[in-house]
Image (spheres, coloured by chain):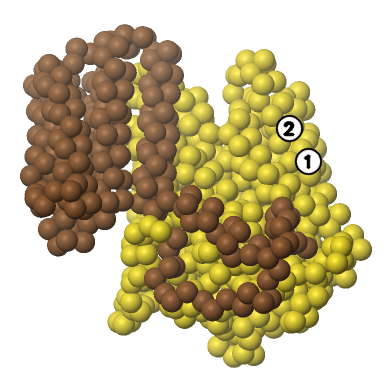
Chain colours: A yellow, B brown
Amino acid sequence: MHDVSHATHHGPPTTFIRKHIFSTDHKVIGKQYYALALVAAFFGMFLSWIMRIHLAWTSAAIPGAQLLSSNGAPGGVITPEFYLQLMTMHGTIMVFFVLTTAPFAAFGNFFLPIQVGAEDMPFPRFNMMSFWVTFVAFLVLVASFVVGDGPTLGGWTQYAPLSAVGSASGPGQGTGAVLWAASIGLFCIGQLLGALNFISTTLDMRTKGMSLMRLPLSAWAWFITSCIGLTAFAVLLPACILLILDHVAGTSFFIPSGLVINDKMLPHSGGSTLLWQHLFWFFGHPEVYIAIVPAMGVVSHILVTSMRKPMLSHRVLIYCMMGIGFLSYVVYGHHMFLSGMNPFSALVFSFPTLVITIPATIIVLIWLGSLYGSRLRINAASLFSLGFISMFISGGVSGFFLAQPSLDILLHATYFVVGHFHMVMGVAAMFGIFAGTYFWFPKMTGRMMNETLGKVHFWMSFVGAYALFMPFHYLGLAANIRRYQAFTDDYLQKLIPVHQFVTVAALFTGFAQLIFLYNLIHSRFWGAKASENPWEATSLEWSTDSPPAWNNFNGKHIVVYHDPYQYGVQGSLGDYVMQTSPEQVATPGDEK
Amino acid sequence: MATTIHEPPVHEPSKIDLTRAPRAASGGGGGIAVADGDLRRLDSYSPPPATTAVWVGIAAITMSFIAFTSALIVRKGGAPDWKHLILPPILYWNTLVLLVSSFTLEAARKQIGGYMRGTTSEKSAFWLHATLALGLLFVAGQYIAWLQLRAQGLYIATSPNSSFFYVFTTIHALHVLGGLLGLGYVIRRFHKGILRKSTLDATSHYWHFMDVLWLYLLFVLWSKI
């Protein structure tokens, strides 16, 4: 036995500040991450509404838009530069502060220690720092709306050299771009501290009997994601440092010689513009999996509970998630097919891109095969899990096309790509977040969410998201280039009615999220009281109070006797046996 | 195992069939294990979190410096403006100081380890203080190296070589400062009598890694590859 019990042996917090603000309790930190993601998600969605309205009715004045920026939207009419600034902020906020924080940092912080049977993470102060650094990163990013001439307009990928040369390349490219790089650098530090805790929690904090293969699929997904995050954010951080130095110290890491912008010769020399793309995408592609793998784990965890039987293969699902994690590092070049890359290199990146669909497909087949013949309990959580699978398949299929360098020449930087990643990464991961919310809300708050509103929310989001993003594929095939703020060319004008339809779908889908918000807030205070185990689930989070005490299990020492998903067996509680229950499982296949 | 600070639970052995071997974990429908079956294995391979965390941290820092190095290689490869930088000689003295500090830390580990096991009764933090002093000397030496370069008119933006020199040495020095904070923490806990061996071991692993990292960076900056 080791001398590590100190790591979790802190007393209950006593003051308001230690309890709710600078708390070292992983559950409070998880909720803080969730709240941050919620604010960020609605802010990002609000920005997308403005963009969509502008794309469909370009000259229309949007009431109140001038409040965001008096220069960017004089009289409520969005300027081209401001459109790009909105787009950059939408992408950055959604990718970093929603898709990374909610499924991974929020749910992972709250539930990983409980699912392994620990009282807390091993380094609670690092954990607290992780959240607050991320919070400051968000403030720094949003501050660019009010500081200088607005946020950067370079897109969430911030391609050099225009991201590195300062205000010569447009409004927001000076202070705004520095704030962007500083914010993302801070975000990386926050996530690295988080990954440190997640990895050591999984490896070192498991309670008696909790072998690695007895971890629930959600815990496995968070563990794998923290390994991906550790290596990915460790590369983005240096990239951000070098980018900031190009701005403030006059270095030339990313700025080439002889660059003329707005008739002005820049004093820099010798930098490599492609260097940024390599560093960024080495992070950027794994980032996609940082968003989707936790959602896969959450959805699997929920589906098993709703199906009342284990997955076809627990192990294969885990190995496939690992395979995706590993392969995510060797495919990043497919973002750069058109960067002047040697065609042979393009082939080298195209091959693993296609190979990565194999573990992804196996996971989907395990889900579908397990669902086949099961008597699924239909509720908001399981509906969103099914919605996740649907979106993951629909969005994933277009990936096959984009993975081919020859086809990507045509599809690159069109709405086809935008549709692809919004479905497979954006909406799918959001559905994973929703599923997790409906499933774990009783445990997080001690109250149930309204199921009827949850189902309405699902159907509106499901129909709305398809109506919103499916036409993007059509637009892309019709050569509609992304990032244009208006469609003035002849061939694009014909597509404007499609854009108007998409905008209506976006407003409709957004409205559905307001129902979710209402449900969330109303249930938090006035929802029906939740029992300890409302879904009759087996993993450790359901063998403690709702919400759990500050030390998770009221000081009880948890011993695990079973694999995580003992459903479809005869137990004293019904058709399931909890991981903590010492009773023996009699399965139909046993010779007894 | 982190949650062993409480009373062990009451087992109900009558409910557990001791003759049945645990099945391979499959997520469900089997895999029950009696307490003695799986637990020994679990106990033996679960290291203290500090030990895991320091390796995780080392992995992240390694990854960052791989990124920096690949930036250097790309920048060097495509640039007409690359001029080799003659390193200030004080860097070699700094290297020596840092290497010696690793030995003093090992001496500290041996001495304190002996004290914890009870083979020696002397409770001394001398070698820890020596390591701390050498670490501070190293950072001071790096600062002098920057001043010397500055005196030659070599600033961060002067040439790509000087850019990388300042970036590498500064980021490394920041990590060394982090190690010094760790050493300070170890010394404080040692005096309070609450130092754990795993904390000391993790700090020394990190410190030795700073050595190896510095030797690597020095080679990258020195070589004309």
Residue that lies at the very extreme toward the right in this rendered image = A373
User: Disc 2 designates what residue?
Assistant: A355
Q: Amino acid at mark 1?
A: Ser
Residue under numbered circle 1: A398
Label 1, label 2: how far apart the Cα atoms are: 15 Å
Please name which of the two marks, 1 or 2, marks the residue nearer to the observer: 2
Q: Position of residue B166 (x, y in %)?
A: 24, 28
Label pair 1/2, CB-CB below 8 angstroms:
no
Instruction: Tell which subunit mark 1 falls on.
Output: A
A56 left or right, relative to B169: right
Q: Residue at x 41, y 18 (%)?
A: B73
Q: Residue at x 40, y 59 (%)?
A: A1
At x 73% / y 61%, what residue is drawn?
Answer: B20
Q: Are marks 1 and 2 on the same chain?
A: yes
Q: Is residue B21 visible?
A: yes
Q: Residue furthest front?
A: B19
Measured from the top left, where is residue A239 in percent x and y? 41, 35
- Above or below, B170 relative to A371: above
